[in-house]
Image (spheres, rainbow, N blue to C red):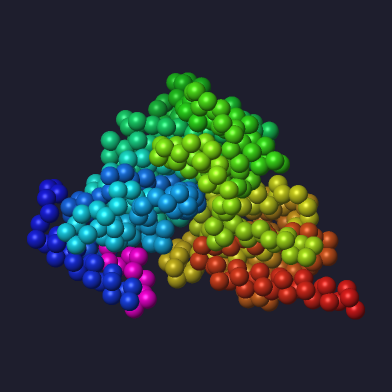
Amino acid sequence: MSNKKTFKFYITLWIAKVSSFALKILRRNATYFPGKIALQLCPNFLGMLEKPKTIIGVTGTNGKTTVCNMINDILSKNKFDFINNKYGSNIDGGIATTLIQGSTFTGKAKKQLAVLEIDERSANKIYPYITPTYLVCTNLFRDSLMRNAHTEFMADILNKYIPKETIMIENADDIICSNIANDNSKIYFSIDRLPTDLEKCENITRDIRICPKCYTKLEYEYVRYHHIGKAYCPKCGFKTPKADYIVTKLDIKNKKMTIKTKNAEEEYDLINDSIINIYNMLAVIIVLKKLGFSQEKINDSFKGLKIVETRFSQEKYNEYEIITHLAKGMNPIACSRAFDYIRTQTGKKAVILILDDLHEEAKGSEDTAWQYDADYEFLNNESIKQIIVAGPRYLDSYIRLLMANISPEKIVYKKDIIEATSQLKLEDIEKIFILHDLYSIEETKQIKLKVKELINNKEEMRKI
Ligand SMILES: [Zn+2]
């Protein structure tokens, strides 16, 4: 298909620009529809539109929003002039909207740098027209089965559509992700063996079990979680690659990590202590290095930066700590990581779970298989004193908790989130974890307010 701008292209661009302007005046969501209209009117629109010279793309199952947020915040802090789809969608319509808003009325790019979060499932609609300079792939896991099918299917479409000129930044500890786009230039990142790594995988699911080259059962030097770790095939030598950026020292207590490259060893401050976010930071550091940042400038830029509150927040309230953590219904890996994070934290805890796959924005779930792929067993832990399940999937979660052999006395199950939260027992606990969905931010706020009210009431009672 020719990318020469046609008359239809200009008409489409103007319609999209006017609609974007009108939606903004009406204070309607202008982050998806202008692009969607443009792609409907002119299917080759993205090909004809001039793109910024440097495009940083971020894809993968988990972590892409966090990685993009960190890059965007740091570039803004350092006064970079760039476009991004932070407030928009990460599928073709959203990306087209971002590029339309970043272009002139003649279809020229206004900015020369773009940071784009790209949904992995939309590869076929995006990469034929957009060539990222660098493409970060955070990891590849099973996600919503009805949307993403299987990781082999996802890997196939990424392999087919990622442009050959794109330099890949891939997670070397993920044997699926590290084998995407093998003909491209690559930069690999890894976290070296940790004391918490295991001999055998203790998760229910592992998305790759046999060698994709010779079909022999894969073995592991060590397993971190699911298929993440150092994997190898005992027969043909297929294995996770050697990384270019390796976290060699991880000091969670003092919030520091050392990254080793071929020529240097550098220390960075951690902004979060979960392994997933350390992988995310590592990917961000590589992108910033490629944009010319020094170690000092990166560390300065990370100062004061937080993981966005809709993903993770931590607050001390009287003698309690309230932690909110995104878990994502239909995404068993995100749930398992959150459950694992809770069990490894110190102190006595209560957990409030409002996982939801029936929300209209989640477009509804066709099945509850993800509940059985998620490691609810991790919540069967001495330090967890009470588990409250609420929301539309409360009964599914309740059954799953019972199947994990969690004592029924520990569990409260009620559909209404506030009624359920009212049953929180504050005696004998120090931390309250609220695990919520992408679509339950408002509900999470209400739960947090209710928890604070209960803590206040307890204080009042004590004074009397
Ligand atoms: Zn093999």
Q: Is residue 66 left or right of residue 44?
A: right
The image quarter containing residue 400 is bottom right
Q: Does residue 327 appear in the picture of this structure?
A: no
Name the dominant secondary structure of the magenta segment: loop
Relative to residue 232, is residue 420 depicted above or below? below
Relative to residue 187, is residue 237 depicted above or below? above
Magenta span includes 31: yes
Tell me what residue is drawn at x 89 percent, y 75 percent. Answer: 463
Q: Is residue 383 left or right of residue 231?
A: right
x then y, percent, for residue 282: 52, 39
x then y, percent, for residue 30: 34, 69
Quadrant in which the C terminus appears = bottom right
Magenta span includes 322: no
Hey, which residue is sitting farthest left in the picture? 7
Tell me what residue is drawn at x 68 percent, y 33 percent. Answer: 195
Along the viewing direction, whichever of 421 and 248 lies nearer the viewer:
248
x then y, percent, for residue 281: 53, 43
Q: Is residue 231 left or right of residue 45?
A: right
The image quarter containing residue 54 is top left
Tell me what residue is drawn at x 82 percent, y 73 percent. Answer: 458
Magenta segment: 26-35
Q: Does residue 267 appear in the picture of this structure?
A: yes
Q: Is residue 178 left or right of residue 374?
A: left
Tell me what residue is drawn at x 14 percent, y 62 percent. Answer: 10
Along the viewing direction, whichever of 283 and 300 lies nearer the viewer:
300
The image quarter containing residue 308 is bottom right
